[in-house]
Image (cartoon, rainbow, N blue to C red):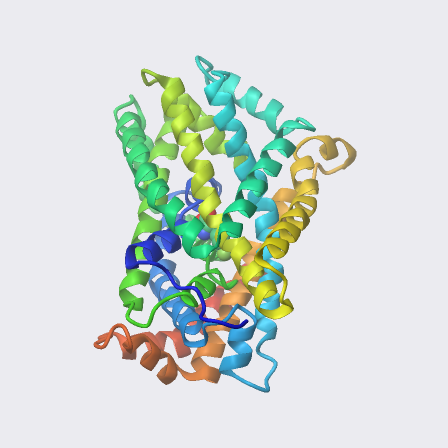
């Protein structure tokens, strides 16, 4: 705990790392999956509204909490509100982070496998039926996905070992621009395929009949998940932020980039599903079937497909690193372990905890009557329950315990004007708690 806390090397490094945390499987894999399951345009509309009312303001909140305390997710609350029990929010966050990282590495492991499979050319020339079959075969194998998951966790641990400012900044600088470039190529390709326009319309046209409290809760969960909010990841990154940094501007850049990539993905995957007749019922595998189908229409499909999946694995890596960092920062600060011991122990624990999720896609499915997916369950309880609850607690803490005035002075250190201070404070104190609570309760009951 002694010594000066690490800080980001540059403004760009911080922005890229935080965007790196936000942009990942949540945008590329989860967003299209939830859009397909929740009825297209109506969901997209709700998602965008929640981004504005809850998402971006909460990024500002978490960054200011982290920077004000310069501590990990648990100690932040005990430093800002001494002699209270609010630090329990931090403990809750650690549990959430642990579960998310466990199932996140399973899907990221699929990306690793798809990268290797692309290099070997096993998807080349297959149509959507062949691609669906091979997807099933791969993810239900008792060994292949475990290998992908293990390799991915190993990489995550190595980067966290190198340290925040060394490892994370450097990798985000390469990954983010590359992923945008590949997505633009994919977008142009998809939109020029026959029949793509129907998918574009489905994606944007809100069918209001499909808006209900379940959709709203899905949208809320998606915003939290995609923005890395409600469990201290953005807060922890804020704790390495220098006082000169403009928090509201950073929050806007993070929000716009994250939403931009999600929308890009939606505009690639959904039209492609129409073009290739891919069933909406396909669930979490949708991206892994649809994208190779698009690649197969491109010249040099092996090249594009390998490049995309390796970049996806890296995008997932920059997110997973921020998750592992939340737990590592806590253990290093509080228990006094070395960074190495903390990262390796957590890596092993996450691997073990994620194994049932990996195996529930195949081996374990044969033993359960309902074919219950542990993976889907872990995703559901974290995104739809733990994150909204965590976010609500953070907002209440900031608005009513620590106080928006203190937060505003923290923010003004690097953003002296902070023109929207009043509106932001009002949102934090009154609007956000009500909106989150309302959507959460009605979503759970409904
Ligand atoms: N935001 C990441 C994504 O969209 O893939 C996932 C994530 C990272 C969630 C970090 C939570 C977190 F703390």
Location of residue 72 in the rendering, given as x and y in whole percent from the top left corner: 52, 68
Q: Quadrant of residue 242?
A: bottom left
- Location of the N terminus by quadrant is bottom right
Residue 282 position in % (x across, y down): 53, 32
On screen, residue 23 above or below 188: below
Residue at x 44% of width, y 31% of height: 309
Q: Is residue 84 above or below residue 388?
A: below
Q: Would you say 7 lies left or right of 342 here? A: left
Q: Residue 372's spot in the image, x, y percent? A: 69, 40
Pick out the residue farthest to the front. 3
Q: Quadrant of residue 443?
A: bottom right
Give percent across and percent down for residue 441.
55, 66
Viewer-nearest residue: 338 or 80: 338
For the C terminus, the quadrant is bottom right
The answer to whether residue 422 is visible is yes
- Near-viewer residue (374 or 5): 5
């Amino acid at each position: 705990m002694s010594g000066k806390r690490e800080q980001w090397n540059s403004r760009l490094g911080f922005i890229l790392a935080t965007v790196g945390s936000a942009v990942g499987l949540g945008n590329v894999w989860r967003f299209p999956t939830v859009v397909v399951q929740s009825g297209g345009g109506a969901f997209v509309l709700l998602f965008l509204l929640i981004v504005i009312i809850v998402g971006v303001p909460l990024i500002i909140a978490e960054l200011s909490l982290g920077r004000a305390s310069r501590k990990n997710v648990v100690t932040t609350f005990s430093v800002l509100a001494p002699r209270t029990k609010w630090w329990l929010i931090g403990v809750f966050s650690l549990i959430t982070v642990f579960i998310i990282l466990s199932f996140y590495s399973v899907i990221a492991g699929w990306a690793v496998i798809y990268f290797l499979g692309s290099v070997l050319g096993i998807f080349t020339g297959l149509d959507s039926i062949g691609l669906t079959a091979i997807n099933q075969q791969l993810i239900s194998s008792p060994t292949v996905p475990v290998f992908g998951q293990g390799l991915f966790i190993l990489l995550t641990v190595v980067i966290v070992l190198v340290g925040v400012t060394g490892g994370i900044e450097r990798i985000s600088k390469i990954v983010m621009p590359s992923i945008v470039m590949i997505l633009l190529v994919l977008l142009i390709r998809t939109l020029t395929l026959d029949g793509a326009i129907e998918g574009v319309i489905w994606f944007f046209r809100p069918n209001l009949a499909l808006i209900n409290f379940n959709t709203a809760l899905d949208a809320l969960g998606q915003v939290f998940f995609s923005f890395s909010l409600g469990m201290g990841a953005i807060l922890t990154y804020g704790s390495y932020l220098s006082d000169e940094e403009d928090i509201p501007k950073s929050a806007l850049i993070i929000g716009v980039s994250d939403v931009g990539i999600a929308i890009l993905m939606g505009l690639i995957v959904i039209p492609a599903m129409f073009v290739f007749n891919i069933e909406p019922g396909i669930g979490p595998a949708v991206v892994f079937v649809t994208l190779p189908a698009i690649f197969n229409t491109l010249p040099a499909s092996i090249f594009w497909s390998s490049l995309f999946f390796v970049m996806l694995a890296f995008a997932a890596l920059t997110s997973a690193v921020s998750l592992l960092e939340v737990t590592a920062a806590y253990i290093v600060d509080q228990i006094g372990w070395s960074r190495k011991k903390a990262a390796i122990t957590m890596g092993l624990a996450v691997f073990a905890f994620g194994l049932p999720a990996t195996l529930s896609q195949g081996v374990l499915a044969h033993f359960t009557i309902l074919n219950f997916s542990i993976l889907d369950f872990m995703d559901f309880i974290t995104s739809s329950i733990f994150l909204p609850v965590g976010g609500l607690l953070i907002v209440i803490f900031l608005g009513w315990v620590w106080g928006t005035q203190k937060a505003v002075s923290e923010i003004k250190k690097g953003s002296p004007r902070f023109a929207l201070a009043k509106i932001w404070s009002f949102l934090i104190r009154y609007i956000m708690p009500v909106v989150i609570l309302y959507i959460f309760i009605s979503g759970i009951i409904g």
